[in-house]
Image (spheres, grey):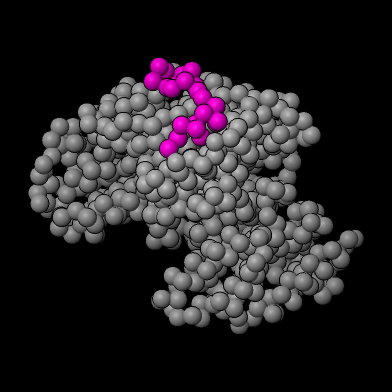
Amino acid sequence: MAWDDGLEGPAYDIAASKARRLRVRAGPGTGKTFALMRRIARLLEEGVSPARILVSTFTRVAAEDLKRELNELDAPRVAAVRATTIHSLCFSMLKRADVLAATGRTARPLLDYETRFLLEDVGPAFGKLGERRKLLKAYEAAWARRQTDLPGFPDEARDGAFQAALLDWLRFHDAMLIGELVPEALRYLEHNPLAAERFRFRHVVVDEYQDLNVAEQSVIDVLAEDAELTIVGDENQSIYSFKHAHPEGLRDFGSRHPQAEDAGLATCWRCPHQVLSMANSLIGHNEVRSDRELLPYRKARKAWVRVVQWQTVPQEAAGLAEVVRASIAAGEVEAGKVLVLAPNRVFANPVRDALQEAGVPAESLFREKELDGSRGENGNPRAEEALTLLTLAADPEDVVALRCWCGLSAATSFGCAAWQRVREHCDSTGSSVVDVLAGVREGEVTWPQSWRLRDRLQQLHARLGALKGVSGRALVDAVFPSGDADFEALRTTAEDVLRSLSVEEGEAVCAERLAEQVRTRVGRPEVPTDVDYVRVMSLHKSKGLTADMVVVAGFVAGVMPRIDRDDGDGVSWRDSLEEQRRLLYVGLTRTRKILILSSVVRLRGEDAHRLQMPGGRPGRVRSVGTSQFLRELGQAAPTPITGEVLLREWPGCRSKGAA
């Protein structure tokens, strides 16, 4: 069919526009993807080569969605249109240009838990761990912390010293950060005015523009310097300030591109009228927001909206699980179309467990086996060690993995001092890391207390020897033993990799391929979209999803919003509060039918302490209440009820007792 078949109104204007710079403001559920796909269909029908069209977005899931939508277009050569993330685009650019080799860098990305060792080795000279993490994020944003900053080199002496220490560590370990891809690509493009990439595209389309920080925006500007540029975004859904993306990026596009034309989509085809009223009321309290209020579709279905309160977190979990079970049993929703959103695992995991106990398939998409190098319940050193072992089975000379292995044992506590000895020996002798570690293992290189590292390396030598030549299923069984809860998440990932690779390569998947694929999935986790189970996740991860039933657990004062008044990174109280509103706005606008906002009145002291709430102490009970955001939801928000009332009135619920 022709690109304009059945197309009218704002969607037609967007698809038909010949503007050299076009900014489209489009709220959730307003059909922006539909309009963009028709725009691309028009370009193809007009004879534009698909190789000259770039479609970029922020996440892999969004990129895959765009590819799927493109493939469904009845347009010539549509499969050749490039749809990718900004990071994948930059990585392919750098590899193709061989820039990494020219600058002495190695494209070996760090996982989160490996980055923890980098931050520990860089040391306390740059503040506490949280401060070092913020410096790292600012470095990855090319030090453009604010929308008004220009990306480039660090301005402050402390930033410069941190960057020098960081790059010294990365070069020694033959590694790089995933977050470096964009700044490195930007430097390459700016320093090479005749680079082929600057002239490759005639049309650049960027979705979710509000998610891009200044460095990412700058890469897009260079790539589109001689091309038509179309950006699509929504200030109200800007929720990535931790990577220095701000809603002003979309708002200020016109000042950076004075000839830009504007278009917009305001009718929401997804959400019921009541939900839209609540979302509009909430976001209306922000000073920085879209000037386009979401409008309801005239035939929008009626919503089921409840605001409910329970006594405790266990009662909340059990009650919400029963409501979800009853809704699925009654045929109102399918398990795969239910989202349970929570601010953290304190509220999320009990709901997941209660759903599973009620016979409802459910999975938590919080990374509860998180490989972040931390200790205690927020980390899993045994799983981190297993993944490190698999990495070394694939490449025994992987310096980052060797660093992690030497520091993961509880006795060495990240092993910073011992590893510093190793680095000093490498520097003084000119020997490689592998040779120095072999000397430590054999007792030829020593220092006081070096026996700890020697024993650790001997253990590694024995384990790698046992894995030599092992592949496929046997390798997975050896590294991630079945039945061990600490390895469950990684084993599931490895088994998925085996299934996908075995089709191509047979059963004997080698260690190199297995490690590569497992590390890719761990390093870039994405939210599954086509599932048959209830997804329990953070509000951040719900971005871009749609569901028939959305349950927000932990809608508790002091948690939602949870604002650090002393952010320490130039983020004001107002800015933090406004982003929290945007985050809840995103959660509210996922639903097509049912919305439940749930809170509790009592928290265990241990949970309150974990949530960093004032007065939270182990052994005590902390009194809490419903989020202060409730009063900002406006008159459309229902009057709160107790959990007991909800269970009594909800069709099909079996639990009628006190809640």
Res. 427 in view: no
Residue under the point 47% across and 20% down: 639
Q: Where 598 falls versus 361 (above or below)?
A: above
In the foreground, 558 or 449: 558
Q: Residue furthest bottom?
A: 469
Q: Relative to 233, is 49 on the left or the right?
A: left
Q: Relative to 417, is 559 on the left or the right?
A: left
Q: How many marks?
A: 0
Residue under the point 70% across and 70% down: 434
Q: Quadrant of the C terminus?
A: top right
Over which residues does the magenta segment extend?
630-651
Residue under the point 59% across and 78% down: 474
Res. 426 in view: yes
Q: Relative to 13, is 184 on the left or the right?
A: right
In the foreground, 467 or 605: 605
Q: Relative to 425, is 265 on the left or the right?
A: left
Q: Residue 482: where, in percent of width, then height?
A: 63, 69
Q: Residue 476: where, in percent of width, then height?
A: 59, 72
Residue under the point 55% across and 64% down: 492
In the foreground, 81 or 277: 277
Please tell me whether residue 512 belongs to the stretch shown in magenta: no
Q: Quadrant of residue 162?
A: top right
Q: Residue 627: where, in percent of width, then height?
A: 55, 24
Q: Residue 388: where, in percent of width, then height?
A: 65, 64
